[in-house]
Image: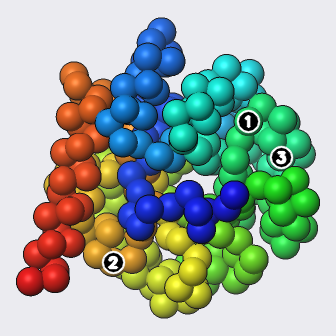
Amino acid sequence: MSWHEWKRGVEIEPSIYAADFANLGSQIRVLLEAGVRIFHFDVGDGHFVEQITIGPIVLESIAPIIHDGGGILDCHLMVSEPERHFEQINAAGGDSVTFHVEACADPAAAIRLARELDLGVGVAFNPETPVEAAAAAAEGADLVLCMSIHPGRSGQSFMPEACARIAELRTLLPDYVSIQVDGGIWAANIAEVNNVGADLLVAGSSIFWQGDLAVAYRTLSGMLLRATTTDRL
């Protein structure tokens, strides 16, 4: 399968990095039952980003739960030399890999390698990186991830200037390439971020740090639905 089959229009991706790891399996099941299709899995190496986060061992433990529930694992590699880890991610059950253009010497070769492993593939870029550079590096990718925070830590506030960067990115990419946004996505801004061109919206603290995960996910989904309905009127 591919991103073409995985996506159901605009997707909200819960970011597993923000989960309660003492209850990870049960939280994933709750979200699958609430309608989540795609989960975002952040890998940080303590080098490209300061934080050492989760990796293939955790991925392998949750992949069967997600796949059995009809879900997909979208793996965001916040690591140096990301292509070195593609085979591990693939073997552990990852469905797609997104690497940072700032951390990869040869994005085209990394995209080819992901394809050889039958993985979906995306290119991410940080707030300081020119939009044009990211778009140019993404030829052949399924998605481009525009960071709306500095990568590596959950709970940061959305950078307002990201909206203009998303809009610019949309003009530079073919229509079939998705734009993903990661960082500070809440009910108050999710519709605006979608309206400027993003169709993959990563949500961490706005889902996992709330009392009822299913309600939190459905609240975000409802904000998107209302905005879309209003636009059609």
Is 25 displayed left or right of 30 in the figure?
right
- Where residue 84 is drawn, which disc sits there? none
* 155, 36: nearer the viewer: 36
Give, as a three-letter code, the residue at label 2: Val
Give, as a three-letter code, the residue at label 3: Phe
Q: Using the numbered discs, state the Cα–Cα distance from disc 1 to disc 2 in whole angstroms.
A: 32 Å
Residue drawn at 39 percent across, 52 percent down: 12
Q: Is residue 5 above or below residue 172?
A: above
Helix, strand or loop at label 3? It is helix
Q: Is residue 95 above or below residue 129?
A: above
Of labels 1 and 2, earlier in sequence is 1
Q: Using the numbered discs, state the Cα–Cα distance from disc 3 to disc 2 in whole angstroms.
A: 31 Å
**Residue 22 visible in image:** yes
Is 67 displayed left or right of 213 in the figure?
right
Of labels 3 and 1, earlier in sequence is 3
Of labels 3 and 2, earlier in sequence is 3
What residue did someone put label 2 on? 196
How many C-alpha atoms fall within 10 Å of the one at disc 1: few (<14), some, or many (≥20)?
many
Q: Which numbered mark, 3 or 1, is in the foreground of this view? A: 1
Give, as a three-letter code, the residue at label 1: Gly
Residue 88 in which image quadrant: top right
How many C-alpha atoms fall within 10 Å of the one at disc 3: few (<14), some, or many (≥20)?
many
What residue did someone put label 3 on? 86
Which quadrant would the N terminus be assigned to in this image? bottom right
